Image (spheres, coloured by chain):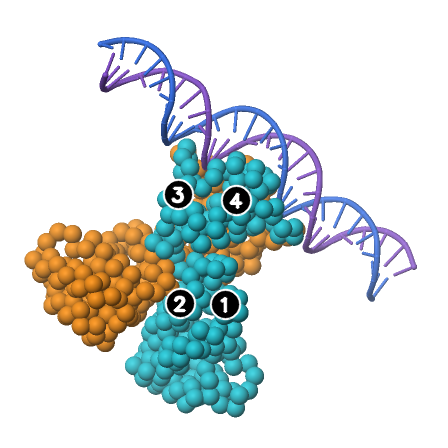
Chain colours: A orange, B cyan, C purple, D blue
Amino acid sequence: MPIDLRPLPDGVPRSEGVHARIRAAILAGDPGPDEALPSERELSDALSVHRHAVREALKRLEQAGLVRISHGGPTRVRDWRRSGGLDLLLDVALAPDAPSRPGLLRSVVELRAAIGVDVARRCAERASPDARRALADAARALADVVASHGDGRVERFVALWDDLVDGADNLAYRLALNSLVEGLAAIPGADDALAPVADDADRLRDLADAVVAGDGDAAAAAVRPTLERPLADPAAILGVGAGR
Amino acid sequence: MPIDLRPLPDGVPRSEGVHARIRAAILAGDPGPDEALPSERELSDALSVHRHAVREALKRLEQAGLVRISHGGPTRVRDWRRSGGLDLLLDVALAPDAPSRPGLLRSVVELRAAIGVDVARRCAERASPDARRALADAARALADVVASHGDGRVERFVALWDDLVDGADNLAYRLALNSLVEGLAAIPGADDALAPVADDADRLRDLADAVVAGDGDAAAAAVRPTLERPLADPAAILGVGAGR
DNA sequence: ACGACTCAACTGGTACAACCACTCAACTGG
DNA sequence: CCAGTTGAGTGGTTGTACCAGTTGAGTCGT
């Protein structure tokens, strides 16, 4: 899938459109690693946009780690699997084809589980007593909602994790979670598939107890089943986002 | 620390300089969340660069999640602790002051450990027999180097992790690792402090055995001590990068 | 006096044109 | 055959002008 040079759609900013076109092509692997992109003048000419719009798009791509711009030389595609950061998850999820959705989703779920377990542990060990009590209340409230199939279980779950990460007092966790949720939001149905089910209600109560008690190991053990459940059920993962 | 409007240094691209100035100010928190940035025209005027250079810098900042640009309205600073992705780790590490180094490094080490343990597990369970044998050889070679205080222990260690992540066959892990190593590279002495010491030699051999055997739990258990060691020794973390 | 409307003065988005700075490869001279 | 030159091509920067949204102050009608 080479760079799509058809006229840009109306309504979207030029620079944004150019960015999307080139990004999609690179993620699809056509201008592969180390290959040279057409010059800014060629691109602006082919897409009928001003060169500045192309430059702004290229700057964003460089920031994301997809291309390497060098002064007198051509702009080259980087091996984004090696050079790209976790933020690329969002772009990959949005890409028309890209790596097959199931594999991508499995990746994200695994990373979320790995980080999440540790977040729960650190939070239980590190957050202030007040924060831990508030968290426990939220966890129990969520457990009730989940057990009774009430509304808002997805939102409450996300909010709970937000607070857990805050309690873990770890900037890297915070930023990684941001990247993850952004990426997940781009996959239709993902956050719904990852939210707790009725069976998880008891575990959430365990989590609440562990957090108030400041027991890191217990907190970690309590969240693991919920976080890893989607991995044990390939069908659930396969089904999500399959529609494209 | 408001935006530094002194003349830009020579030798660095204008757009790059502008980007660095605004980024530093935002990370330092002066134009705080939801505050409006000066208009593009004001910035270009104050910094004596063309408006296009400012625009390119702002596009990059938007890509990184630091600002939100809206057409008719002012460009506003975002709450990057909420909206920023893991890629920000690099920028934060490079910021003149930013969150205190020790806390930042502890964060990164914790995240690395959380992911690393899972990487080892998945790799042992999932990689091809050939890849696992090659990994085991590399791990044993590293163990020998470490035990005998030979050269290249940092490079070999990094390379080993690179291969482990490949073996884990997980794009999210791959990208997260990219962000982490980029961020760590920006902290002087960090990768040296995180490399294995003589005591870790035996654990590396355990890892080799676990990987060839395809025993995920054993692999995870083998890498944990090495990855978590820096956390048990606050002095080691505090010392790194203290010089600035 | 109050509401709805108008419009001018911002904001960012785009365009055309020209030039500078750097790279690289083909060419030229020794 | 190699070293130096040079020119075409690349990205970097500037200038100017105008388009396109947003906002709020002013005005008009009621």
Same chain assignment for discs 1 and 2: yes
- The alpha-carbon separation of the residues under discs 1 and 2 comes to 12 Å
Q: Chain of mark 3?
A: B
Q: Amino acid at mark 3?
A: Glu
Mark 1 vs 4: CB contact within 8 A: no
Considering only order in the chain, which callout, 2 or 3, is on the residue closer to the N terminus?
A: 3
Q: Which residue is mark 3?
A: B35
For image coordinates 12% across by 64% down, the residue present is: A201
Residue A9 lies in quadrant: top left
Q: Earlier in the sequence, mark 4 or mark 3?
A: 3
Residue nearer the viewer, A80 or B18: B18
Q: CA distance from mark 3 to mark 2?
A: 26 Å
Q: Tell me which residue sits at (20%, 53%) in the image.
A: A155
Q: Amino acid at mark 1?
A: Ile
Q: Which residue is mark 2?
A: B103
Question: Residue tagged by mark 4?
Answer: B56
Q: Secondary structure at mark 4?
A: helix
What x and y, as percent, mark residue D26?
A: 38, 17
Labels 1, 4: front one:
1
Question: Which label was assigned to residue A113?
Answer: none
Q: Residue A232 location, x and y as percent?
A: 22, 69
